[in-house]
Image (cartoon, rainbow, N blue to C red):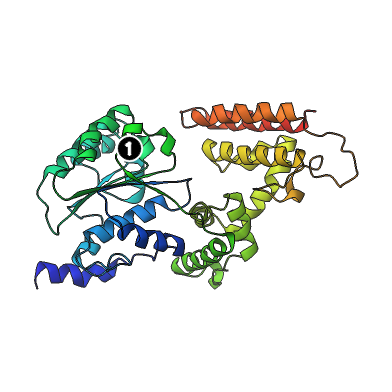
């Protein structure tokens, strides 16, 4: 059997999940346009990385269609199993490990010997290797692709290393930069790319997709739960709670539903505001500091919104602390003051910039809960 036939015959081992409908529409639009460098930008949870992967896969496919890659050729299989020689993935080491993409031998040896921890930034050495990658002869097909995600994790030195090649790539080399924070990129990087702003799905479409994906994930877990009982499909109301909590970002909501039981996660979210009003840090125990700061920023936003007479965005009004969500015509004993809430919001924004530093997580969560209680009880 030839090498190509062998690759094709084994391609059925790895099945690529179909793109969400709103991502498929964007993929077809991008494939119909010309350009060697694209910048996919928008808030997190809209599928930048999924769209970037699908675009790279279609560019490298041996039998592409206007809808994307064929999914059956040897090239598609090589992309799916992370071994395609014409695809360079430029990501932080932490993300590479999480996704199962191989690291270079030197880096893997350093991490295995515990000489250092995996980097959360895109290192300049990796950018230099990407530049060298663009100068090699193609191993198959007519295109080579460099995918950078999250692009904002490039510091100035790393970005400048990539700049000249991004502007004038050698041969048929294409770049895809995907980011959650385009404003953090160097203007020179942004100016050398064609921009694409990620589209938001409407709530009904995102909710239907989330229900389908969560149900499929539950079925894919295989064996029934303990006691021989089959896995219970997630409730639509619980998934909608998570989608609202994620700000309407379906990828974030799906990751949340897959990492914990949707019903439990939804109840946890609904209990959060009143727990913070009591200063109860125990509800934060299962979250990382970054997740806690994000949740508290959403809580602060909603309390401020209700205080100004608007509707909450991330929580149900009945779940907010009683003084804020009091009945019309009544005067709560304590209404959080605008100055206290605005000060809390500014403090959370400052904390978010350094939340990934190696602080003592337990002490940090206690401090955040205490500060939340103070803000929610101040007049």
Is the residue 271 above or below the residue 290 in the image? below
Q: Position of residue 53 (x, y in %)?
A: 32, 55
Q: Is residue 9 left or right of residue 251?
A: left
Q: Look at the image and tell me in which quarter the N terminus lies.
A: bottom left
Q: Which residue is mark 1?
A: 191
Q: Residue at x 57, y 62 (%)?
A: 207
Which residue is more in the foreground, 242 or 310?
310
Placement of 90 over or under 18, stated as above or below:
above
Relative to 328, is 94 on the left or the right? left
Which of 323/364 is in front? 323
As drawn, is 370 to the left or to the right of 324? left
Mark 1 nearby-residue class (10 Å; few <14, some 14–19, many ≥20): few
Question: Where, by quadrant of the figure, is residue 33 drawn?
Answer: bottom left
Quadrant assignment for the C terminus = top right
Could you tell me if residue 11 is visible in this image? yes
Q: Nearer the viewer, residue 54 or 27?
A: 27
- In the shown orientation, is residue 86 left or right of residue 197? left
The number of numbered discs placed on residues in the rendered structure image is 1
Residue 343 image position (x, y, % from top left): 67, 26
Where residue 268 appears, as percent x and y from the top left, is: 65, 50
**Is label 1 in a helix, a strand or a loop?**
helix
Q: Is residue 374 visible?
A: no
């Amino acid at each position: 059997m030839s090498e190509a036939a062998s690759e094709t015959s084994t391609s059925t081992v790895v099945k690529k999940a179909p793109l969400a409908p709103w991502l498929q529409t964007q993929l077809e639009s991008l494939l119909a346009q010309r350009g060697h460098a694209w910048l996919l930008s928008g808030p997190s949870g809209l599928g930048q990385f999924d769209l970037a992967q699908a675009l790279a896969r279609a560019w490298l496919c041996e039998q592409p269609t206007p809808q994307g890659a064929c999914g059956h050729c040897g090239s598609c299989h090589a992309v799916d199993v992370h071994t395609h020689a014409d695809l360079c993935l430029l990501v932080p080491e932490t993300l590479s490990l999480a996704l199962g993409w191989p690291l270079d031998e030197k880096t893997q040896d350093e991490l295995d010997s515990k000489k250092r921890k995996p980097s959360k930034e895109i290192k300049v050495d990796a950018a230099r290797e990407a530049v060298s990658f663009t100068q090699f002869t193609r191993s198959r097909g007519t295109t080579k692709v460099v995918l950078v995600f999250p692009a904002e994790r490039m510091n100035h030195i790393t970005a400048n290393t990539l700049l000249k090649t991004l502007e004038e790539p050698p041969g048929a080399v294409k770049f895809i930069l995907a980011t959650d924070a385009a404003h953090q990129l160097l203007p020179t990087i942004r100016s050398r790319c064609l921009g694409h702003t990620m589209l938001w799905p409407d709530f009904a479409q995102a909710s239907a997709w989330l229900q389908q994906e969560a149900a499929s994930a539950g079925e894919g877990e295989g064996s029934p739960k303990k006691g021989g009982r089959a896995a219970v499909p997630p409730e639509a109301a619980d998934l909608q709670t998570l989608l609202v909590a994620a700000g309407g970002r379906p990828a974030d909501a799906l990751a949340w539903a897959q990492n914990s039981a949707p019903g439990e996660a939804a109840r946890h979210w609904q209990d959060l505001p009143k727990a913070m009003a009591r200063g109860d840090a125990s509800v934060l125990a299962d979250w990382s500091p970054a997740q806690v700061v994000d949740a508290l920023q959403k809580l602060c936003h909603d309390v401020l919104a209700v205080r100004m007479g608007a509707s909450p965005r991330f929580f149900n009004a009945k779940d907010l602390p009683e003084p804020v969500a009091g009945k019309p015509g009544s005067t709560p004993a304590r209404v959080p003051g605008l100055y206290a809430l605005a000060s809390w919001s500014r403090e959370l924004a400052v904390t978010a910039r350094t939340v990934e530093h190696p602080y003592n997580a337990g002490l940090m969560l206690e401090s955040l809960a205490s500060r939340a209680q103070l803000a929610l009880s101040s007049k």
